[in-house]
């Protein structure tokens, strides 16, 4: 015990000495200089460290220095720092120091280096930094490539800009609105209108609603495109019927906004993502059997009900007060709404919900038997998470199917889906929320049109939802 106590005291003294040692002192000096945006002070601390053989700077301190060499915190807010903000010579010296002292470089290091080179207009140098990151088996981020894309766009090198966007997407990453703005600006400056429209079609699946800044860029774009004009007034009713008034052309355009669903390819990607996560967390054979059953189910599914969410609505969770009558009332409403040839609605419930607690009451036993006999009940096995089953079934069921639940699916598990944007786009079109008041059920179906960027089937207009809930509309006038 005495030996352990002595060892602990030694460790504490060593930790205290490290906290006040030269490396820690240099770190504090560099961090403080970064907070004050004083590059000279940070560089002085670096020079002191470089002259000493007694210690080496930690990776964090080197990354902060590289970050400052790239211009610091605010320099990249618009996508690309001004050339005078970057310090290429100093960045190279920091990298040489890291190599000489064997200080590990991270994604932050390579990204900062890429930014320094991009700010100086050296697009290929920025991409070399990204390639070096990949060679070190590190994972790039959007920012790793974005700086090269912005630099290409600024130079008007559309071929390189498009190549960098392709590299970004090959990594499974997506451009942000900043990148789309830079690209649209470059296409406008080059009068490359076909390329710009192609980019807008890529953008509409990834940016649901443009910011005010992006909307101004869109106005400038459509004002520059020959034969197009931006509407002076736009009115949209609850059914998605819109009227755009173009005063200068004395033209009034009537159009209809659409319900935008996932493509078959996107739905397949979402299903694959759900299946992958489910099989990692469920008994794989159990979920495999479920997927196979869905594939051969002849009548398909039309209305899928999150039984626990409906049954626990306004109930006491602490006593597991599952209300089976509420599930029946929702099923009754769905039966009323069903069209000829539709599959019966189906409630998903976990095995424990149908075996214990309130399920033992005779009335509830009768309801469960009724649902089971009508093909309106699917029970997930013990040890499973029923969320995966009703979610996969609802996505699998196709474009006309819907899911009845008030679950907003914000749990960390849903955030882990490979394409969360796809999931939330699907949910927007297929989630039916409900209320139950005094025993009466009200189902709230999705809007008849989707509030997102839309293009006419004949490419004669574009509509963009605005932050203030109005719409920006551009129409062909020739």
Image (spheres, grey):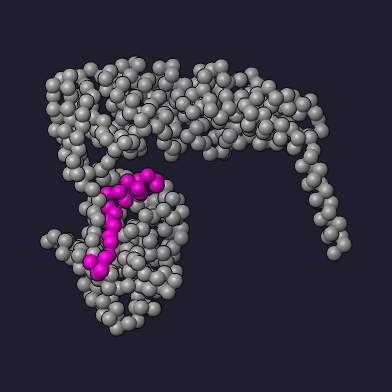
Q: Nearer the viewer, residue 381 or 436?
A: 436
Camera-side residue of 69 and 157: 69
Between residue 280 and residue 8, name the one nearer to us. Answer: 8
Q: Is residue 431 magenta?
A: yes
Image position, residue 426 (x, y; %): 31, 49
Q: Residue at x 36, y 69 (%)?
A: 315
Q: How many marks?
A: 0
Residue in the image at 29% along x and 57% along y: 433
In the picture, the quarter occupied by the N terminus is: bottom right
Q: Is residue 153 visible?
A: yes
For the record, the magenta segment spans 419-440
Q: Report if residue 26 lies within the magenta region.
A: no
Determine which quarter of the picture holds residue 158.
top left
Residue shown at the point (20%, 19%) measured from the top left: 227
Q: Please tell me whether residue 350 is drawn above or below residue 112 in the rendered image.
A: below
Residue 106 percent location from the top left of the image: 61, 36
Please, is residue 32 above or below residue 436 in the view?
above
From the viewer's perspective, tell me whether residue 106 is left or right of residue 180: right
User: Does 132 appear above or below 290?
Assistant: above
Residue sitting at x 80%, y 51%: 12
């Amino acid at each position: 015990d005495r030996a352990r106590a002595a060892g602990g005291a030694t460790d504490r003294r060593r930790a205290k000495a490290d906290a006040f040692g030269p490396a820690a002192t240099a770190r504090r000096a560099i961090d403080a200089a970064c907070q004050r945006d004083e590059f000279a002070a940070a560089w002085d601390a670096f020079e002191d460290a470089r002259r000493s053989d007694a210690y080496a700077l930690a990776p964090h301190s080197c990354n902060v220095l590289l970050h400052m060499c790239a211009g610091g915190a605010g320099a990249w807010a618009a996508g690309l720092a001004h050339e005078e903000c970057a310090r290429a010579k100093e960045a190279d010296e920091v990298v040489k120091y890291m190599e000489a002292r064997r200080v590990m470089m991270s994604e932050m290091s390579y990204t900062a280096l890429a930014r320094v080179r991009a700010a100086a207009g050296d697009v290929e140098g920025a991409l070399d930094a990204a390639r070096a990151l990949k060679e070190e088996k590190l994972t790039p981020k959007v920012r790793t490539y974005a700086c090269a894309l912005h630099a290409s766009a600024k130079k008007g090198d559309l071929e390189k800009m498009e190549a960098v966007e392709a590299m970004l997407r090959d990594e499974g990453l997506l451009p942000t609105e900043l990148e789309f703005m830079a690209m649209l600006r470059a296409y406008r400056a080059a009068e490359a209108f076909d390329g710009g429209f192609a980019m807008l079609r890529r953008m509409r699946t990834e940016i649901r609603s443009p910011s005010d800044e992006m909307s101004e860029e869109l106005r400038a774009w459509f004002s520059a495109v020959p034969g197009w004009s931006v509407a002076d007034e736009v009115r949209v009713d609850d059914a998605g019927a819109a009227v755009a008034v173009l005063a200068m052309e004395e033209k009034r355009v009537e159009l209809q906004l659409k319900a935008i669903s996932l493509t078959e390819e996107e739905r397949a990607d979402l299903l694959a993502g759900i299946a992958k996560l489910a099989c990692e967390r469920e008994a794989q054979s159990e979920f495999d059997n479920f997927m196979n059953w869905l594939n051969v189910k002849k009548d398909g599914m039309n209305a899928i009900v999150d039984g626990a969410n409906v049954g626990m609505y306004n109930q006491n969770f602490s006593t597991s007060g599952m209300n089976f009558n509420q599930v029946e009332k929702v099923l009754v409403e769905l039966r009323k709404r069903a069209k000829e040839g539709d599959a019966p609605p189906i409630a998903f419930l976990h095995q424990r919900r149908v075996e214990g607690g309130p399920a033992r009451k005779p009335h509830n036993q009768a309801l469960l038997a009724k649902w089971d006999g009508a093909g309106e009940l699917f029970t997930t096995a013990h040890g499973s998470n029923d969320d995966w089953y009703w979610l996969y079934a609802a996505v699998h069921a196709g474009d006309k199917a819907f899911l009845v639940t008030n679950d907003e699916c914000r749990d960390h598990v849903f955030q882990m889906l490979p394409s969360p944007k796809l999931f939330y786009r699907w949910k927007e079109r297929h989630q039916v929320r409900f209320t139950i008041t005094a025993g009466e059920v009200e189902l709230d179906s999705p809007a008849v049109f989707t509030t997102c960027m839309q293009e006419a089937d004949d490419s004669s207009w574009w509509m963009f939802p605005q932050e203030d809930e109005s719409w920006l509309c551009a129409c062909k006038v020739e």
